Amino acid sequence: MLKFICYPKCTTCQKAQKWLDENEIAYELRDIKQERPTLGELTAWYKMSGLPIRRFFNTSGLLYKSMDLKNKLPDMTEDEMLQLLATDGMLVKRPLAVCEDAVLVGFKEAEWAASLK
């Protein structure tokens, strides 16, 4: 079953959840703030996604900005970035949709339709 990892107060997450419901796609909901992704999960999702590690960061988040990660990430290794992401769910770009053969980061309707329908 699809894992839908989101922050319920996030409007993009709400749009994604509405889209899943309208398209009758079953999912298991997980609040990223209450149950943050583990280092193991993030590592597996990153490898499966084929995306650059930086795509997993919530660059518009307050925590990202207050930690000045825009300037710090270029000097970090992938392992250091994954460990940092695992420290706080609010650093992770959301929503995340994780299924057997795909990991979708952020909500782009066309991308989700192509992968999940």
Image (cartoon, rainbow, N blue to C red):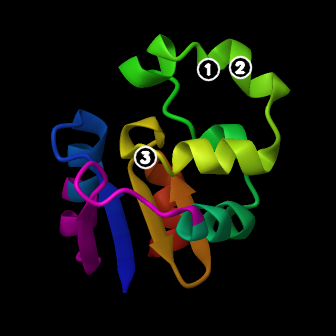
Residue on which disc 3 sits: 107
* Rendered residue at 33%/65% (across/down): 4
* Rendered residue at 58%/42% (across/down): 84
* 63 magenta-colored: no
Measured from the top left, where is residue 62 in percent x and y? 38, 18
| CA distance for labels 3 and 1 | 22 Å
Amino acid at circle 1: Leu
Locate the N terminus and report the quarter of the image it occupies: bottom left
Residue on which disc 1 sits: 69
Which element type, helix, strand or loop, lies under badge 2? helix
Q: Which residue is more in the foreground, 45 or 115?
A: 45
The magenta segment: 18-39
| CA distance for labels 2 and 3 | 26 Å
Instruction: Give the left or right position of residue 78, taking residue 99 as reference.
Output: right
Q: Which residue is more in the foreground, 112 or 103?
A: 103
**Residue 23 visible, this angle:** no
| CA distance for labels 2 and 1 | 5 Å
* Numbered badge on residue 72: 2
Which callout, 2 or 3, points at the residue further toward the start of the chain?
A: 2
Residue contact between numbered discs 2 and 1, judged by CB atoms under 8 Å: yes
Amino acid at circle 3: Phe
Which callout, 3 or 1, points at the residue further toward the start of the chain?
A: 1
Q: How many marks?
A: 3
